[in-house]
Amino acid sequence: MEYLALWMFLFVCIVLIIGYPVALSLAGSALIFAGVGILFDVFDASILSALPSRLFGIVNNQTLLAVPLFVFMGAMLERSKIAENLLNAMTLLFGKLNGGLGISVIIVGMILAASTGIVGATVVTMGMLSLPTMLKRGYCPKYSSGVICATGTLGQIIPPSIALVLLGDVLSSAYQKAQLNMGIFNPKTVSVGDLFAGAVIPGLILVGLYILYTITLAILKPSSVPPLDDEEVNKLMNGESKLSIFLSALIPPLLLMCCVLGSILLGYATPTEAAAVGAVGSLILAAWQKQLTLPNLQSVMQSTVKISSMVFLILIGASLFSLVFRGFGGEELIHSVFEGIPGGVIGATIVVMLIIFFLGFILDFIEITFVVVPIVAPILLAMGLDPVWLGIMIAINLQTSFLTPPFGFALFYLRGVADKSLKTIEIYKGVVPFILIQVLLLGVLAIWPELITWLPQTIYG
């Protein structure tokens, strides 16, 4: 019977590849297999009675309330010309250096990630603002497309990240379940704030590795990343002083970032409360930039409703899928497979990371978070892994799913706004070095887990 769970997982992957909506694919596949199981008397129909309480738990979850608030904040900042002002300021600072435009894109992408946390918005915005300039200045098309896609995905790991909010909620349930299975009836908890704190240092290291790669390219092949000339720099200044440009571009997003992330890390606010502060702050910034118009507000609210509805509908479908998966005994099968893997917890962790990496070629990070993580996380946590370390490792691994063809969403976003002269194969080749950098970071964090666990332990004890 338990092998039906694996067939169900394979079936839903095929359905998703064909192109059916994610939420309906998850729920529909689960109901089909549950019906077949009931028909052949290999599935207990009473298991489905737990679904209403699960759905109530989803809609009553205060942590998940941060999702629409962070989405609203990111969508509003996208329309506030924050990215354009930041890019101009960073280009003035680094533009005269070989690779300066690339470094500017990376730094702006980092600040946008810490302000918005939405991958699609960052990739599209940076693709429209910086890609034409980079190609016009003679930058290598592969590097230009690769650095824009890669920095766009920083919103996955640099807090406040919607991915970490979703992952934190899933890991919290998995961690409590693992402890109950171990006979610990007063379980500890892991929060979204813990993951935010754990992601800060790895996120900064990843940004540093991107910049190091750009500097190396500038040294070894300077013609592929040429500098700007004086005329272009003067054009960017537009008669203003460099100081005024820097202050007007940097201070607003940095203030918002400190208010949102600082309030979480210092314990003054929960992620949901901080998300509300961020949403209000984004409205203030939009008004300051004279972008708080009725059409913009309508567009932001529509985008927020669409994205939030998609996330919650997928979560409901995934909840039904995991319920049926466990009803077929799939969790016990996975547990027995992990126990048979040589190398114990290390071998099991490597296998899980490889599975998530390759699933990223065909599945979205939300699907993997809601379907795969609830299955494998309780088993790995019961083996003694630190939940914050595991969460950040999974988050960075999921970050590669935005870059890995054929279904890397960052590739699709850039392809949609890039000029037709930029070939799709150049976009695919351009992201390869950045995927390798992310894999390298996973190796570094596996060797030195303190890079993840030190800050949460220092802040929260």
Image (cartoon, helix red, strand yellow):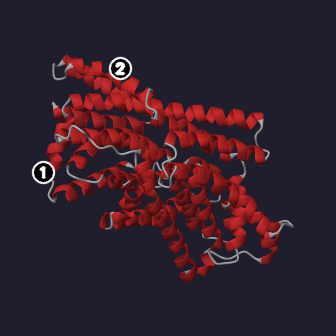
Q: Could you tell me residue 33's position as x and y percent? A: 27, 25
Left or right of 448? Residue 400 is right
Q: Position of residue 364 (x, y in %)?
A: 43, 44
Quadrant where the N terminus sits is: top left
The answer to whether marks 1 and 2 mark residues whose Cβ atoms lie closer than 8 Å is no
Residue 415 visible in image: no
The mark lying in front, picked from 1 and 2, is 2
State whether residue 300 is above or below residue 259: above
User: Badge 2: how crowded within 10 Å, few (<14), some, or many (20+)?
Assistant: few
Q: Is residue 134 left or right of residue 363?
A: right
Residue at image position (20%, 29%) is: 328
The residue labelled by disc 2 is 52
When asked about the image quadrant of residue 6, the answer is: top left
Q: Nearer the viewer, residue 337 or 93?
A: 93
Inspect the image, locate mark 1, and give the three-letter code of the amino acid beneath it: Gly
Q: Residue at x 68, y 76 (%)?
A: 227
Percent coordinates x, y for residue 27 in the rendering: 37, 27
Residue type marked 2: Pro
On the image, which quarter does residue 276 sit in? top right
Residue under label 1, please give it. Answer: 340
- Residue at image position (61%, 48%) is 121
Can residue 48 be seen here?
A: yes
Q: CA distance from mark 1 to mark 2?
A: 35 Å
Element assignment for label 1: loop
Query: Residue 176: horizontal and vertical position, in percent?
Result: 28, 40
